[in-house]
Image (cartoon, grey):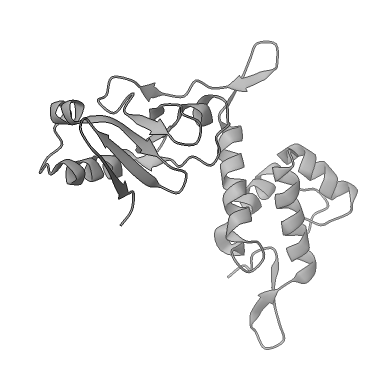
Amino acid sequence: MRIPYGFTVDNDGKVTIDKTQAQIVQMICREYLNGNSLGGLSRMLESRGILSPSGNTCWGRAAIDKLLSSSRYVPFIISLELYTAVQFEKAARSNQELNNDGSTQRKAIRYNSKNVLSGLLVCAECGANYRRITCRSGEVVWRCANRVERRTCTQSPSIAEQDITLLICRELGMDTFDAEHVRNSLNQILIEHSGLLSFEHKHVQRFSTLYE
């Protein structure tokens, strides 16, 4: 079995952390979050004479991308918080498209407003409505519009549609989701950054949490 970069095998045959390589992994993650590109990271590592995982003087972009994506470093070399931040940054950067003049812009994100929840879900952080997003995996989630379009309101949570519908069913005592009943019963659902949902009924206000 090949030992991942950042680890080594001691004299007893046990896998341990290679402190020098571990510091390089941490540096790569920090530099990436600071805005350095895969190509920029490759040039930086080569200019410092740091050998790649395969022992070469050249760092391929694929090798750096693989390192940034690896969860094996958690929590031994990098924290879960750092790993998660890197994955969010990777996802954000992948949502780019090339213009004819060579510049880049963010791709249009697919969302659907033809849904009873549109206009009903409101971000408590900034007051914007939540939008229905279809992920590449096919999963449907709801996300603050300002987070989607402006990359602001970063504390607002993304919520799976199946979780929202389940909570609404519980709140309104429905065995199955009834869009018309929801429309007639609720004014809005306020979503806190902590995941707390505030259901504002037509006549009374109650609270529920996203995950129980």
Q: Quadrant of the C terminus?
A: bottom left
Name the foreground residue: 192 vs 45.
Answer: 192
Q: Is residue 170 visible?
A: yes
Instruction: Answer with the quarter of the image where residue 2 lies.
Output: bottom right
Residue 103 placement, left or right of 97: right
The x and y percentages for residue 150 are 57, 25
Residue at the extreme front: 203
Q: Nearer the viewer, residue 44 or 29?
A: 29
Looking at the image, how many numbered discs can be counted on the residues?
Answer: 0
On the picture, is 76 further left or further right than 179? right
* Residue 53 visible: no
> Of residues 134 and 16, which is closer to you in this image?
134
Q: Nearer the viewer, residue 24 or 150?
A: 150
- In the image, farthest residue toward the left: 175
Q: Residue at x 77, y 44 (%)?
A: 41
Q: What residue is rendered at 61% in x and 40% in y?
A: 89
Residue 13 rendering spot, x and y as whole percentages = 65, 84
Residue 118 percent location from the top left of the image: 32, 24
Residue 68 is left or right of residue 168, and the answer is right
Q: List the single residue furthest toward the top.
A: 100
Up/down of 11 relative to 39, above or below: below
- Residue ID at (59%, 63%): 74
Quadrant location, the N terminus: bottom right
